[in-house]
Image: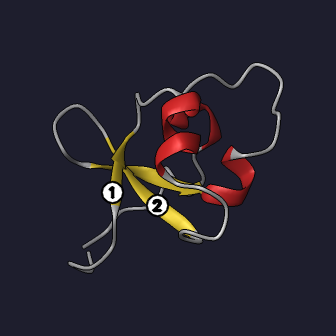
């Protein structure tokens, strides 16, 4: 994984994520699980949309089934 890529915990509440990463601050974030392993990618723009049922970053993750080598 690129070292300059910013990360966020997958269990972070969307309200905190929105506060910490306003629109335009980044395109996407790498989400990490409790053990610090790759959990997927979170779109900053998508996180700022009102998505029914989404409460945490984990609810919006993409490419969670991909593995980084």
* Image position, residue 22 (x, y; %): 60, 56
Name the residue tied to disc 2. 29
Query: Does 21 appear above or below 1?
Result: above
Q: Locate residue 53: give its quadrant.
A: top right
Q: Which of the 4 image quarters holds residue 59? A: top right
Q: Is residue 59 left or right of residue 5?
A: right
Residue 52, horizontal then vertical, whole percent = 83, 24
How many neighbours does mark 1 have within 10 angstroms: few (below 14), some (14-19), or many (20 or more)? some
Which residue is at 23% across, 48% downward?
37
Query: What secondary structure is marked by label 1?
Result: strand
Q: Is residue 39 left or right of residue 57?
A: left
Quadrant of image for the N terminus:
bottom left
Q: How is the image coloured?
A: secondary structure
Q: Which residue shows up at 81% across the image and 32% down it?
A: 51
| Residue found 36% across the figure and 48% down from its top | 8
Q: Is residue 69 left or right of residue 29?
A: left
Please report contact status of discs 2 and 1: CB closer than 8 Å, yes or no.
yes
Q: Residues within 10 Å of mark 2 (few under 14, many from 20)?
A: some
Labels 2 and 1: the sequence-earlier one: 1
Residue labelled with disc 1: 7
Residue 61 position within the rendered picture, expressed as x and y whole percent measured from the top left:
57, 46
Camera-side residue: 64 or 48? 48
Numbered tag placed on residue 50 in the rendering: none
**Quadrant assignment, res 47:** top right
Q: Position of residue 27 (x, y in %)?
A: 59, 71
Q: Residue at x 40, y 28 (%)?
A: 11
Name above or below for residue 54 compared with residue 32: above
């Amino acid at each position: 994984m690129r070292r300059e890529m910013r990360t966020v915990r997958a269990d972070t509440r969307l309200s905190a994520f929105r506060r910490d990463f306003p629109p335009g601050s980044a395109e996407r974030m790498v989400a990490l699980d409790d053990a610090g392993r790759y959990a997927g990618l979170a779109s900053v723009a998508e996180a700022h949309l009102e998505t029914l049922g989404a409460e945490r970053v984990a609810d919006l993750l993409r490419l969670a089934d991909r593995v980084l080598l």
